[in-house]
Image: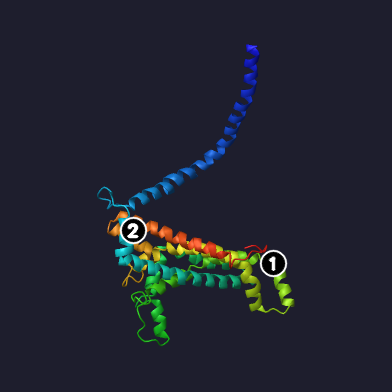
Amino acid sequence: MRTGRTIERADVTTPHSKISYRDRRQNLPAHLFLAPWFIGLIVLTAGPMLVSLYYSMTEYSLLTDPQWVGLRNYERMILADDRFWASMGVTLRYVVIGVPLQLAFALAVALLLNRGIRGLTAYRALYYLPSLLAGSVAIAVLWRQVFGLEGAFNVVLTGIGFDAPPNWIGNPDTALYTLILLRVWEFGSPMVIFLAGLRQIPAEYYEASALDGAGKFGQFFKITLPLLTPIIFLNLILQLINAFQAFNSAFIVSEGTGGPLDSTLFFTLYLYQEAFTNFRMGYASALAWVLLAVIALFTAVSFLTSRYWVHYDDGGR
């Protein structure tokens, strides 16, 4: 009896152990392929974020040990830092004006390219080129030269009869708008996405509306725009996040100062100044978390309001 029980127990447990071992062997390649991503998530993303959150509640200058101050950095930011509010205002104007203009221009170009012209691939690559180059230092330097007092833009204005055109970069009333224009020039990425969306709209919709007497404008507002709202929403989210994180253009054009008179002081540029010019790493970390909260807020509002204007082809919202 003892022998039978031993054999019976072995028969019950052995298959389970074999199945468990076989499952582990089968899952091992997946775990190995996912390991670099998990390591990167922990070491390069989650870890630094947690350290930054800790530093945001300290007074830390890189040269001394962090001193815990709690929420004092956030209190100072909101109650006593005028440059914080100035940078926030500049960034919000840049986002609220620049992103809609960029998307409108990208959609207009996509509509032109969708008309079946020859060499569409070449045109698409050509128009996408500004998005690849606009974030570079070279383009920012070129932009500063073009809109300077003696830049190419003023040379053209002088040639057509304008006397003493202003220094667009050096004037606090116009400096930000030159950067917004640079933002609009980076239309290639949303344009390609818009073009892909336009190619997915069935031609039968336009043929049926034409038989009913609809014109081009009617087709655009009744067919194209409603069916394109999911693509507009996608581009809006992507460009909002990207615009809030803009840095290179303001840094190069203003030579790192955010001037004139803080008119191009983007939030990211102010964060950089606090971290690497004033060596207030704790305060800069607090600024970074505020930026994350602002981006999250705008993204959340976009998703919450999308149900009222984003239409899907299946009738859902």
Are the two marked residues, 2 and 1, in contact with CB atoms closer than 8 angstroms?
no
Report x, y in % for residue 309: 58, 68
Q: Which residue is drawn at 35% across and 63% down?
A: 269
Counting the numbered discs, the total is 2
Q: What residue type is labelled 1?
A: Pro
Q: Badge 1: how crowded within 10 Å, few (<14), some, or many (20+)?
A: few
Q: Residue at x 56, y 70 (%)?
A: 107
Seen in the picture, residue 1 relative to 76 is either above or below; the reply is above
- Quarter of the image with the C terminus in it: bottom right
Q: What residue type is labelled 2?
A: Tyr
Tell me if 62 is positioned left or right of 314 in this view: left
Q: Can residue 114 be seen in the rendering of this structure?
A: no
Q: Which of marks 2 and 1 is in front?
A: 2
Find disc 2 in the rendering and name its residue.
Answer: 74
Q: Which residue is drawn at 69% across and 78% down?
A: 214
Chain-order first, disc 2 or disc 1: 2
Tell me if 266 is positioned left or right of 35 in this view: left
Q: Badge 2: how crowded within 10 Å, few (<14), some, or many (20+)?
A: some
Seen in the picture, residue 221 relative to 236 is either above or below; the reply is below
- Quarter of the image with the N terminus in it: top right
Report x, y in % for residue 10: 62, 20
Q: Residue 202 carries which label?
A: 1
Per the model, the C-alpha gap separating discs 2 and 1 is 52 Å
Report x, y in % for residue 275: 31, 57
Assign a secondary structure to mark 2.
Answer: helix
Q: Residue 285 carries which label?
A: none
Q: Residue furthest left?
A: 64
